[in-house]
Image (cartoon, rainbow, N blue to C red):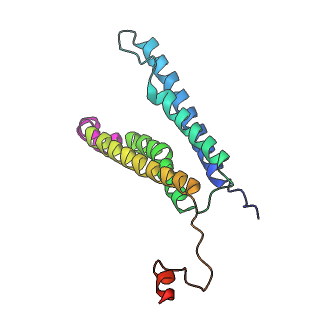
Amino acid sequence: MQRKAYNTPFWIMLFIAIFVATWNIVLLISIRQFAVKYPQSPVVRFNFLIVGWPVLLCLETIVYRILRKKIKSGVNIRIHLLAIGLCFFFLPLFTVFVSSILPQYLGITSYSKYLWVINKFRSVIFWGAFIIGHAFFMTTIVNIFRKNDIPNTDNEQPPGILDGILDEY
């Protein structure tokens, strides 16, 4: 009996990868416009975060696409997808929302005092969710390639070590 393909992780990861790639392209364009406006500022020409994250997410998407028929349980996959969604989708949107709302209520001077707290909070949440998500991703891959033990369905007990010796006496 062939197992039904489990395509949901592929589509969710594809959505997150496209979102991150789009977000990073907009970020790159903003950095370029900033460099044109302020030529004396240092410019990030190549940054791992701009290119690396979309590539990593695309590789995970390809892994989910290749292994879609071998996925047995979706619990580890759900935790991975939630963690990656938190890292790359909800956390950036939350940061933009907080960065646009907080200065209006606190004022620019108070906001600058809390900015490092916001960045630390974001970093801790990002890396914690990233590590937890990828731990569950690796667990999923290990579970897919793990050999299944075939349980003994016979009611008979397997022969013991001393059964042959004791039968002679």
Q: Residue at x 65, y 55 (%)?
A: 70
User: Does the stretch in magenta take in 111?
Assistant: yes
Give residue 61's position: percent from left, percent from top.
Answer: 61, 43
Determine whether 9 is above or below 149 in the image. Answer: above
Q: Residue at x 62, y 82 (%)?
A: 154
Horizontal arrangement in the rendering, residue 35 relative to residue 141 (left or right): left
| Front residue (pair 18, 53) | 53
Horizontal arrangement in the rendering, residue 106 relative to residue 139 (left or right): left
User: Does the stretch in magenta take in 88?
Assistant: no
Give residue 95's position: percent from left, percent from top.
Answer: 41, 42
| Magenta stretch in the rendered image | 103-115
Give residue 133's position: percent from left, percent from top.
Answer: 46, 51
Give residue 114's position: percent from left, percent from top.
Answer: 26, 41
| Front residue (pair 34, 135) | 135
Residue extending furthest toward the front: 169
**Residue 2 visible here:** yes
Q: Residue at x 71, y 56 (%)?
A: 5
**Residue 86 visible here:** no
Determine whether 18 is above or below 155 in the image. Answer: above
| Front residue (pair 44, 94) | 44
Magenta residues: mostly which secondary structure?
A: helix
Q: Residue at x 49, y 54 (%)?
A: 139
